[in-house]
Amino acid sequence: MEQSFFRQLCGNFATGVTIITSQKADGSQTGFTANSFTSVSLDPALVLFCLSKEAQSVSFFSIGAFVGISILTDQQTELSNRFANPKITAAERFEEVALLPQTSAPVLANCLAWMEGVVESKIDGGDHWIFINRITQGAIESPSSSPILYALGTYNTLKD
């Protein structure tokens, strides 16, 4: 199937928007915007996200790495765009961004909800890696907020 049509086809499926983060032992951090995120299992608590094999941040997500998942509100499109912009370095993405203090991976504060987990497996998924993560903790931070959605090439809200 032709790639641009497949992308357009999949764009008809509305998804939530997350920022996936991790940190190496030397303190360097990475983060990227992802809508390729879903729950996998309740017992054990597993989620997955996908990341391009060409992404500079792939090396941060080795088996056993801590992963932060921040679920964005409909007021955080600027934050989503910052972490999606390939022209902005990993360090610049985190500038002036509040992080939660109680996590092993960098987790963004003031989001709708967050999770922290550990990479359990890395599966070949064509031009992407599929990372399966066991969730160890999480919280709903802004229960009265609405999630941001992405569909048809643009941000949307539940109110739209």
Image (tube, rainbow, N blue to C red):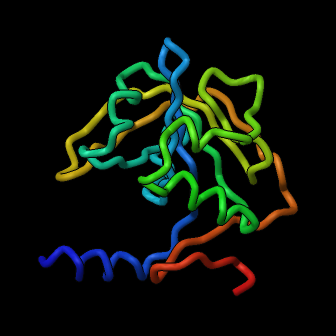
Q: Is residue 59 above or below residue 83?
A: above
**Furthest residue toward left:** 1
Counting from the top left corner in percent of width and height, residue 22 is at: 51, 30
Exactly how many numbered labels are in the figure? 0
Quadrant of the snapshot with the C terminus: bottom right
Quadrant of the snapshot with the N terminus: bottom left
**Furthest residue toward right:** 144
- Front position in the image: 140 or 27: 27
Side (left or right) of 58 relative to 150: left
Q: Residue at coordinates 25% horizontally, 39% vertically from top-left? A: 123
From this viewpoint, is residue 120 visible? yes
Residue 82 falls in which quadrant of the image? Answer: bottom right
Q: Residue at coordinates 59% horizontally, 76% vertically from top-left? A: 155
Q: Is residue 103 above or below residue 129?
A: above
Counting from the top left corner in percent of width and height, residue 77 is at: 65, 65
**Furthest residue toward bottom:** 160
From this viewpoint, is residue 45 visible? no
Counting from the top left corner in percent of width and height, residue 36 is at: 43, 57
Residue 62 falls in which quadrant of the image? Answer: top left
Counting from the top left corner in percent of width and height, residue 148 is at: 66, 67
Q: Is residue 85 above or below residue 47?
A: below
Q: Residue at coordinates 33% horizontally, 28% vertically from top-left? A: 59
Side (left or right) of 78 relative to 59: right
